[in-house]
Amino acid sequence: MKAIMTNDLLEYRRKHEEHLSAEEWYGIIKTGSVPMEEVKKAKIAALRERCEQEITAGFQSKAAGHAFGLKDHDQMNFTQQLLMFVQDASLEAAAWKTESDQMVELDRKLFLEVCKEAEHHKRSRLTKFWMLKEQVEAAGDLEQVERIKW
Protein backbone atom coordinates (compact mmCIF):
# COMPACT_ATOMS: atom_id res chain seq x y z
CA MET A 1 0.00 0.00 0.00
CA LYS A 2 1.40 3.37 -1.00
CA ALA A 3 1.97 5.87 1.80
CA ILE A 4 0.05 9.08 1.38
CA MET A 5 2.58 11.83 0.92
CA THR A 6 2.22 15.57 1.44
CA ASN A 7 2.10 16.32 -2.30
CA ASP A 8 -0.64 13.71 -2.80
CA LEU A 9 -2.72 15.32 -0.05
CA LEU A 10 -2.19 18.81 -1.38
CA GLU A 11 -3.23 17.68 -4.87
CA TYR A 12 -6.32 15.98 -3.41
CA ARG A 13 -7.21 19.18 -1.58
CA ARG A 14 -6.80 21.29 -4.70
CA LYS A 15 -9.16 19.01 -6.62
CA HIS A 16 -11.78 18.70 -3.88
CA GLU A 17 -11.38 21.83 -1.76
CA GLU A 18 -14.79 23.32 -2.40
CA HIS A 19 -16.47 20.03 -1.51
CA LEU A 20 -14.62 19.26 1.73
CA SER A 21 -15.43 20.61 5.14
CA ALA A 22 -12.47 21.44 7.33
CA GLU A 23 -13.38 18.43 9.51
CA GLU A 24 -13.30 16.13 6.45
CA TRP A 25 -9.94 17.58 5.39
CA TYR A 26 -8.53 17.00 8.86
CA GLY A 27 -9.78 13.39 8.76
CA ILE A 28 -7.88 12.83 5.52
CA ILE A 29 -4.70 14.71 6.33
CA LYS A 30 -4.12 13.10 9.73
CA THR A 31 -3.80 9.67 8.08
CA GLY A 32 -0.94 10.62 5.78
CA SER A 33 2.77 11.23 6.05
CA VAL A 34 2.24 14.90 6.65
CA PRO A 35 4.30 17.24 8.83
CA MET A 36 2.73 17.82 12.25
CA GLU A 37 2.33 21.53 11.49
CA GLU A 38 0.02 20.69 8.56
CA VAL A 39 -2.01 18.35 10.76
CA LYS A 40 -2.31 21.09 13.38
CA LYS A 41 -3.41 23.63 10.75
CA ALA A 42 -6.09 21.22 9.55
CA LYS A 43 -7.29 20.52 13.11
CA ILE A 44 -7.45 24.25 13.89
CA ALA A 45 -9.41 24.84 10.67
CA ALA A 46 -11.87 22.09 11.70
CA LEU A 47 -12.27 23.66 15.15
CA ARG A 48 -12.76 27.11 13.59
CA GLU A 49 -15.45 25.71 11.30
CA ARG A 50 -17.24 24.08 14.24
CA CYS A 51 -17.05 27.35 16.19
CA GLU A 52 -18.61 29.23 13.30
CA GLN A 53 -21.36 26.62 13.00
CA GLU A 54 -22.20 26.94 16.69
CA ILE A 55 -22.23 30.73 16.56
CA THR A 56 -24.41 30.94 13.48
CA ALA A 57 -26.83 28.29 14.77
CA GLY A 58 -28.34 31.08 16.85
CA PHE A 59 -29.24 31.36 20.51
CA GLN A 60 -32.14 31.19 22.90
CA SER A 61 -32.82 34.51 24.62
CA LYS A 62 -33.89 34.12 28.23
CA ALA A 63 -34.82 37.80 28.39
CA ALA A 64 -37.14 37.71 25.35
CA GLY A 65 -38.20 34.08 25.55
CA HIS A 66 -37.43 33.46 21.87
CA ALA A 67 -34.68 31.95 19.74
CA PHE A 68 -32.84 34.33 17.42
CA GLY A 69 -30.63 33.67 14.42
CA LEU A 70 -27.01 34.73 14.44
CA LYS A 71 -25.87 34.17 10.88
CA ASP A 72 -23.73 36.93 9.37
CA HIS A 73 -26.75 38.90 8.11
CA ASP A 74 -28.42 38.55 11.53
CA GLN A 75 -25.32 39.95 13.21
CA MET A 76 -25.30 42.89 10.80
CA ASN A 77 -28.99 43.51 11.49
CA PHE A 78 -28.41 43.44 15.26
CA THR A 79 -25.56 45.93 14.85
CA GLN A 80 -27.60 48.21 12.60
CA GLN A 81 -30.56 48.24 14.96
CA LEU A 82 -28.31 48.82 17.96
CA LEU A 83 -26.78 51.81 16.19
CA MET A 84 -30.25 53.12 15.42
CA PHE A 85 -31.15 52.97 19.13
CA VAL A 86 -27.91 54.76 20.00
CA GLN A 87 -28.38 57.43 17.33
CA ASP A 88 -32.10 58.09 17.84
CA ALA A 89 -33.18 58.48 21.47
CA SER A 90 -36.82 58.79 20.40
CA LEU A 91 -36.83 55.26 18.98
CA GLU A 92 -38.68 53.14 21.53
CA ALA A 93 -38.93 49.66 20.00
CA ALA A 94 -38.04 47.48 17.03
CA ALA A 95 -39.93 44.69 15.32
CA TRP A 96 -37.70 41.62 15.17
CA LYS A 97 -38.01 38.22 13.53
CA THR A 98 -37.37 35.13 15.66
CA GLU A 99 -35.93 31.84 14.44
CA SER A 100 -39.50 30.54 14.13
CA ASP A 101 -40.31 33.45 11.76
CA GLN A 102 -42.50 35.08 14.37
CA MET A 103 -42.37 38.87 14.52
CA VAL A 104 -41.95 40.24 18.03
CA GLU A 105 -41.61 43.78 19.29
CA LEU A 106 -38.56 44.45 21.42
CA ASP A 107 -38.43 47.69 23.37
CA ARG A 108 -35.10 49.46 23.74
CA LYS A 109 -34.20 47.84 27.08
CA LEU A 110 -35.15 44.34 25.96
CA PHE A 111 -33.33 44.73 22.65
CA LEU A 112 -30.14 45.72 24.48
CA GLU A 113 -30.51 42.67 26.74
CA VAL A 114 -30.95 40.41 23.69
CA CYS A 115 -27.81 41.96 22.17
CA LYS A 116 -25.90 41.16 25.38
CA GLU A 117 -27.11 37.57 25.19
CA ALA A 118 -26.06 37.36 21.54
CA GLU A 119 -22.61 38.68 22.43
CA HIS A 120 -22.30 36.17 25.29
CA HIS A 121 -23.33 33.34 22.95
CA LYS A 122 -20.74 34.36 20.37
CA ARG A 123 -17.98 35.24 22.83
CA SER A 124 -18.29 31.94 24.73
CA ARG A 125 -17.82 29.97 21.50
CA LEU A 126 -14.88 32.12 20.43
CA THR A 127 -13.25 31.75 23.83
CA LYS A 128 -13.64 27.98 23.61
CA PHE A 129 -12.09 28.00 20.12
CA TRP A 130 -9.11 30.09 21.27
CA MET A 131 -8.50 27.72 24.20
CA LEU A 132 -8.66 24.63 21.96
CA LYS A 133 -6.45 26.30 19.34
CA GLU A 134 -3.77 26.88 21.99
CA GLN A 135 -4.01 23.22 23.01
CA VAL A 136 -3.54 22.10 19.40
CA GLU A 137 -0.56 24.40 18.95
CA ALA A 138 1.03 22.99 22.12
CA ALA A 139 0.36 19.33 21.21
CA GLY A 140 3.48 17.26 20.67
CA ASP A 141 2.08 14.43 18.57
CA LEU A 142 -0.95 13.23 16.64
CA GLU A 143 -2.38 11.40 19.65
CA GLN A 144 -2.48 14.63 21.66
CA VAL A 145 -4.07 16.48 18.72
CA GLU A 146 -6.69 13.74 18.40
CA ARG A 147 -7.70 14.05 22.05
CA ILE A 148 -8.68 17.69 21.52
CA LYS A 149 -12.42 17.75 20.83
CA TRP A 150 -14.94 20.53 20.47
Image (spheres, helix red, strand yellow):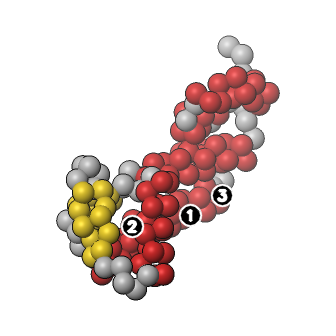
Element under disc 2: helix
Where residue 134 appears, x then y in whole percent?
61, 62
Left or right for 74, reference 140 = left
Q: Earlier in the sequence, mark 3 or mark 1?
A: 1
Q: Is residue 120 visible?
A: no
Residue at horizontal 24 percent and vertical 49 percent from the top:
100
The residue to which callout 3 is attached is 137
Residue that lies at the very extreme toward the bottom in this rendered image: 89
What's the amino acid at mark 1? Trp
Left or right for 77, reference 17 = left
Residue that lies at the very extreme toward the right in this rendered image: 7
Element under disc 1: helix
Quadrant assignment, res 97 = bottom left
Of the pair 63 and 50, the residue shown nearer to us = 63
Whole-Å distance between the Cαs marked 2 and 1?
Answer: 18 Å
Of the pair 96 and 142, the residue shown nearer to us = 96
Judge whether 22 appears above or below 150 on screen: above
Where residue 19 appears, x then y in whole percent?
58, 27
Residue that lies at the very extreme toward the front in this rendered image: 90
Q: Looking at the image, is mark 2 or mark 1 nearer the viewer? A: 2
Total labels drawn: 3
What's the amino acid at mark 2? Ala
The residue to which callout 2 is attached is 118
Residue at horizontal 64 percent and vertical 33 percent from the top:
29
Q: Earlier in the sequence, mark 2 or mark 1?
A: 2
Of the pair 104 and 52, the residue shown nearer to us = 104
Judge whether 122 appears above or below 141 on screen: below
The residue to which callout 1 is attached is 130
Whole-Å distance between the Cαs marked 2 and 3?
Answer: 29 Å
Quadrant assignment, res 55 = bottom left
Where residue 4 appears, x then y in whole percent?
71, 24
